[in-house]
Image: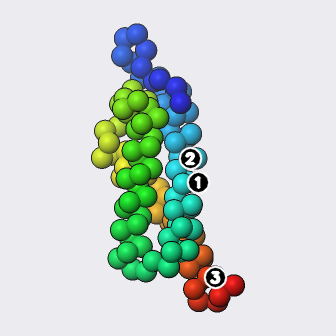
Amino acid sequence: IENTMTKNDRISMENLGYNLSKIDTVNTVLFILGGIICGILGLKSLNGFLFFMFVTVVVSISHLVAMKFRLEQYCNMNFLSFAIFAMKNHAMSYVLFWILVYALIHIYKA
């Protein structure tokens, strides 16, 4: 991840796009993994949604730690916007793999 701030505190759109692309790729993998874990654990309904919220917080905090808590410098967002960005872009992947793994393990007993 590259720092988007320059000497004059201007945002480099090229670096911003690169950073968001890399974050999106990592988020995709981690939310798919979260959905798989949720399916393996056999979580249903509200418990599955709460696990999704837990995954969102863990993923967002792990990115924040990797950026040394300087989120605005790397992706020009505050923490809440960053977490919501992750949730809305990866909810479908999470649900798809949650349902797939749950069905294979708990319904069809594969």
Q: Would you place residue 25 above or below residue 56 in this image? A: above
Q: Secondary structure at mark 2?
A: helix
Residue closest to the far front:
41
Task: Give the x, y percent position of residue 19.
Answer: 52, 34
User: Which corner quadrant of the image does residue 21 belong to?
Assistant: top right
Residue denoted by label 3: 104
**C-alpha gap between disc 1 and disc 3:** 20 Å
Packing grade of label 1 (10 A; few <14, some 14-19, many >=20) is some
Q: Secondary structure at mark 1?
A: helix
Residue depicted at x 56% and y 74%? 40
Picture coordinates of residue 30, whole percent (x, y): 54, 54
Three-letter code for the amino acid on which mark 1 is drawn: Val
Identify the residue under disc 2.
26
- First in sequence, mark 1 or 3: give its number: 1
Question: Which residue is pictured at 50% across the width and 70% down the height?
Answer: 38
Residue drawn at x 41%, y 51% as measured from the top left: 58
**Camera sees residue 87:** no
Residue occupied by mark 1: 29
Q: Are marks 2 and 1 in contact (CB under 8 Å)?
A: yes
For disc 2, the neighbor class at 10 Å (few under 14, some 14 to 19, many from 20) is few
In depth, the one of 17 and 95 nearer the eye is 95
